[in-house]
Amino acid sequence: METVVKKIDPEYFQDIELQKACQILQTGGLVAFPTETVYGLGGNALSAEASDKIYHAKGRPSDNPLIVHIADMEDLYDVALSVNKKTLELAKAFWPGPLTMIFPKKENVPLSTTGGLNTVAVRMPSHPVARALIRCSKVYIAAPSANRSGRPSPTRAEHVIEDMDGRIDMILDGGPVGIGIESTIIDMTEEIPVILRPGYITEDMVKGVIGSVLTDPAIVAVSPDKNIVAKAPGMKYRHYAPRGQMTIVEGDLAAVTEKINVLVKEQEKEQKKTAVIATEESKERYNCSRVYSIGSRKSEGSIAAGLYDILRQMDAIGAEYIYAESFAEDTLGQAIMNRMLKAAGYHRIKV
Ligand code: AMP
Ligand code: MG
């Protein structure tokens, strides 16, 4: 299959530029498109065949459900069986935006879209291209991240091309995305809603709107625990991972730098290709020829936005051993560390 790549300026485009993409969605094809979190791989959410194509293109296990993207509040009632007051409050505060909510599903949402579950995950993205695409195609778009299963999520169209060229009909290239990590997922089917995946919308932000919220214990677990089963099916898979072996070194920054320099020296003595994931503040302190700055410690947002691109660069240079600094696990840091720990297969050293 030939994959058409179409550039589109998110600040200034006309719906006519999306015509071909809309036709593809309406006829059951797949289009990757930018959202404010990461690039999504879109297909008609109400078509079992389109969902099957998404799983196939990604190489994704079929029990890992897709998020349904809508453009307007009334769309929610077409896919969710019940919508409560807390949902309306959260939607008012955070939609359109990087929050996914889970509801009992309506009959018309195929089980292939929900990975066999009777619930459906719904998000209203704020990215202008994503919104226009949903509206012009008149299709609710099932869209997981547009990466091959297990690879880091794509934050630029080049990442999507790397993973999906020849496997899907079209890629809309809207440039780098703003947030860079996936949406916060919250289960609205419980009396007290439960955060199943941390993201840009933090627990405190949710609490500020609906008073109380719980966090799935699997998120805060320091290592995978057989007794704690993540409620979001995707959280159980190795994910976001570079091919090399990644280790996160935690502690006081000076001690971390020293430890990483020792580890790098050991591996380089063995002729291993080694790389360091550092920050703007620390990048000059390493004795390694491959030091990558993920962003500035003064802005957690810059770190979230840089994370997946850096993880992909580790593969591009063929890094065999990767040593990364760690970040405080509060606010956005919780989402960052959640992704980094999974990328590292929970391999961490404290100094
Ligand atoms: P992705 O779009 O690749 O970030 O993946 C979406 C993730 O949302 C899945 O991996 C699941 O973990 C989660 N998810 C989607 N639908 C549901 C659902 N009905 N119940 C629980 N988790 C869900
Ligand atoms: Mg994903």
Image: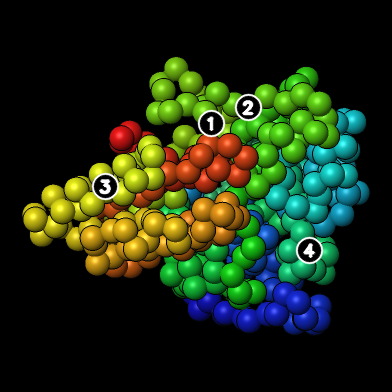
What residue lies at 45% left-to-right and 61% top-to-bottom? 280
Question: Which label sits on residue 219?
Answer: 1
Badge 1 crowding class, 10 Å Cα cut-off, few under 14, some 14 to 19, many 20 or more, is: many
Of labels 2 and 4, earlier in sequence is 4
Q: In this view, does 115 lie above or below 177?
A: above
**Three-letter amino acid code at the position of disc 3:** Glu
**Amino acid beneath label 4:** Arg
Real-space Cα separation, disc 2 to disc 3, in angstroms? 35 Å
Question: Element under label 1?
Answer: helix
Q: Which of marks 2 and 3 is nearer the N terminus?
A: 2
The residue carrying mark 4 is 131
Q: How far apart are marks 1 and 3 (CA)?
A: 29 Å
Which tag is nearer the camera, tag 3 or tag 4?
Answer: 3
Circles 2 and 1 in contact, beta carbons < 8 Å: yes
Query: Can residue 297 be seen?
Result: yes
List the residue tagged with mark 3.
Answer: 258
Q: Check disc 2 and report the residue beneath it.
A: 215
Label 1 with label 3: CB-CB less than 8 Å: no
Q: Earlier in the sequence, mark 3 or mark 4?
A: 4
Instruction: Please report the residue visible at 80 percent of the width from the left and 33 percent of the height from the top.
Output: 208
Q: What element carries label 2?
A: strand
Q: Position of residue 195 (x, y in %)?
A: 65, 32
Asked whether mark 4 lies closer than 8 Å to ligand 1, one says: no
Distance (Cα) linking label 4 and label 1 = 30 Å
Q: What residue type is labelled 1?
A: Ile
User: For residue 349, which quarter of the picture?
Assistant: top left
Gap in angstroms between the C-alphas marked 3 and 4:
47 Å
Q: In screen coordinates, is 160 left or right of 316?
A: right
In this picture, is 29 found above or below 347? below
User: In the image, what residue occupies the spot 55% across and 63% down?
Assistant: 155
